[in-house]
Image (spheres, rainbow, N blue to C red):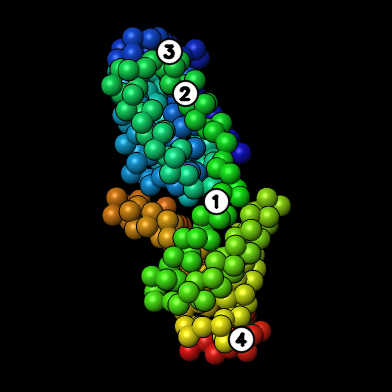
């Protein structure tokens, strides 16, 4: 649930000391920056990036911003330099797929606003355009993810039979992940089910004696599920002093890794393969 609080003044005054030369209220700035921060955090940005982008944009708009980033909410206060007017907004972070494209474009937007290349109204229009960007073609992502995981198999010295098995197991598991995600299935259940399916298919290399590296085929068949970005972001937040978000992201990544392991062990037990 989102809540709003205004400062002492009933009607926010216009901010005119911004580099873009436009007049706008503190409330408008706060609402825009809150939504921007929520979207940026949701697409996979670290807390330090969100902080720097918000500070950069607030300064360009002639305001000061104080922000508290929590695992599921963002508390932002925007005020004028003389503290005569302020506005506070608490918003929930926007859960979405991790997107380096949107992450990069939102960061570029903050620099364009800070450098005076665009004004406040143009920044809002570009922001709406960026967040409305459609996701990449799912079939293309499916094939590319399968090829990437198969390449990992080859990188770990898997033979070509193992590479083919990993490609097929990843193709099936990732497709199942897309379908379950569309149906709003809990992400932990998704990881367990997809890891189970991929490991069962990956074990066919050993079951039918297709190649000489069956262990590599099974081990790399579930690598596409490893939550690498949450792990990296958690350490980045830890170094930046955002300990609550760091612990939350690390815990989430560990839980997903445990779910992956449960599915993998279940697949190996079903195919009667030793885990060690």
List the residue tagged with mark 3: 24
Quadrant location of the N terminus in the rendered image: top right
Q: Is residue 88 at all visible to an observer of this figure?
A: no
- Residue 170, disc: none
Marks 3 and 4, how far apart in space?
A: 68 Å
Marks 2 and 3, how far apart in space?
A: 17 Å
List the residue tagged with mark 4: 207
Measuring from the top left, give residue 28's x and y in whole percent. 47, 19
Q: Identify the residue shown where x is 64% and y is 58%.
A: 175
Q: Earlier in the sequence, mark 4 or mark 1?
A: 1
Labels 1 & 3 near each other (Cβ < 8 A) = no
List the residue tagged with mark 1: 141
List the residue tagged with mark 2: 126
Marks 1 and 2, how far apart in space?
A: 26 Å
Classify mark 3: residues with Cα within 10 Å, few (<14), some (14-19) or many (20+).
some
Q: Secondary structure at mark 2?
A: helix
Classify mark 4: residues with Cα within 10 Å, few (<14), some (14-19) or many (20+).
some
Instruction: Give 60 or 86, whichever is nearer the viewer.
Output: 60
């Amino acid at each position: 649930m989102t809540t709003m609080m205004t400062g002492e003044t009933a009607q926010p005054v216009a901010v005119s000391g911004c580099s873009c030369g436009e007049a706008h209220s503190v409330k408008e700035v706060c609402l825009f920056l809150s939504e921007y921060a929520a979207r940026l955090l949701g697409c996979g940005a670290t807390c330090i990036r969100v902080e720097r982008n918000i500070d950069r944009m607030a300064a360009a708009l002639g305001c000061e911003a104080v922000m508290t980033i929590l695992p599921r909410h963002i508390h932002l206060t925007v005020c004028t330099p003389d503290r005569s007017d302020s506005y506070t907004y608490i918003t929930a972070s926007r859960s979405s797929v991790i997107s380096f494209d949107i992450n990069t474009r939102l960061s570029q937007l903050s620099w364009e606003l800070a450098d005076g290349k665009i004004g406040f109204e143009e920044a809002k229009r570009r922001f709406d355009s960026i967040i409305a960007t459609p996701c990449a073609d799912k079939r293309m992502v499916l094939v590319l993810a399968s090829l990437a995981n198969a390449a990992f198999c080859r990188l770990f010295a898997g033979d070509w039979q193992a590479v083919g098995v990993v490609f097929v197991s990843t193709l099936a598991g990732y497709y199942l992940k897309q379908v379950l995600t569309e149906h709003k299935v809990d992400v932990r259940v998704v990881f367990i089910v997809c890891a189970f399916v991929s490991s069962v298919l990956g074990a066919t290399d050993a079951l039918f004696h297709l190649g000489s590296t069956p262990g590599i085929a099974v081990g790399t068949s579930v690598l596409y599920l490893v939550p690498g970005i949450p792990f990296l972001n958690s350490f980045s937040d830890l170094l930046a002093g955002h300990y609550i978000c760091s612990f939350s992201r690390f815990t989430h990544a560990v839980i997903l890794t445990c779910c992956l392991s449960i599915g993998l062990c279940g697949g190996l037990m079903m195919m009667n393969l030793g885990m060690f």
